[in-house]
Image (cartoon, rainbow, N blue to C red):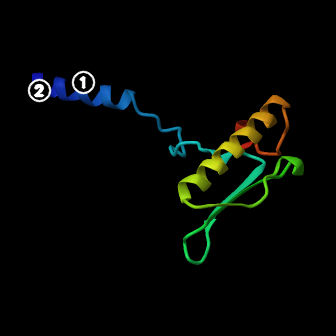
Amino acid sequence: MQTLKKLLRLLIREEIGRNFHTLDNDPYSYNDYPGMEINVYADANGKKWFAQVTCLFDDKLSTPLNSFNSEIDANNFARQSAEQINRIRLANNIDTDTPAINDID
């Protein structure tokens, strides 16, 4: 009886900490920012990397296509540019027509 009681308590403690409401547990990154398209790719030889961030709500914030010697540099440029555009979007309260949590069924 005592063993059954311990096992039941252990099971209840484990179940209390679970969250069954989260549909997507993946981390949120700069690639997921609304209102922009981020492109990072290599040339055919794989020696040059290109990065471009296109802002969909204000064309003036878009970056030109830039070339880099490594994938790390290209990703760093794309991340910094996307974060800068996202800060501008948040500071100016720009709506990018993404659905709110209440709109998702």
| Residue type pointed to by label 1 | Arg
| Image x and y of residue 88, in percent | 80, 35
Q: Quadrant of residue 82?
A: top right
Report whether residue 105 is seen: no
Report whether residue 97 is seen: yes
The residue that mark 2 highlights is 3
Helix, strand or loop at mark 2 = helix
> Quick one: 67 or 13, which is closer to the camera?
67
The residue positioned 55% from the left and 59% from the top of the image is 71
- Tell me which numbered mark, 2 or 1, is placed earlier along the sequence: 2
How far apart, in angstroms, are the residues tagged by discs 2 and 1? 10 Å
Considering the image in quadrants, where does the C terminus appear?
A: top right
The residue positioned 60% from the left and 48% from the top of the image is 76
The residue positioned 77% from the left and 41% from the top of the image is 85
Q: How crowded is the residue under tag 1: few (<14 C-alpha within 10 Å), some, or many (20+)?
A: few
The residue that mark 1 highlights is 9
* Residue closest to the far bottom: 44
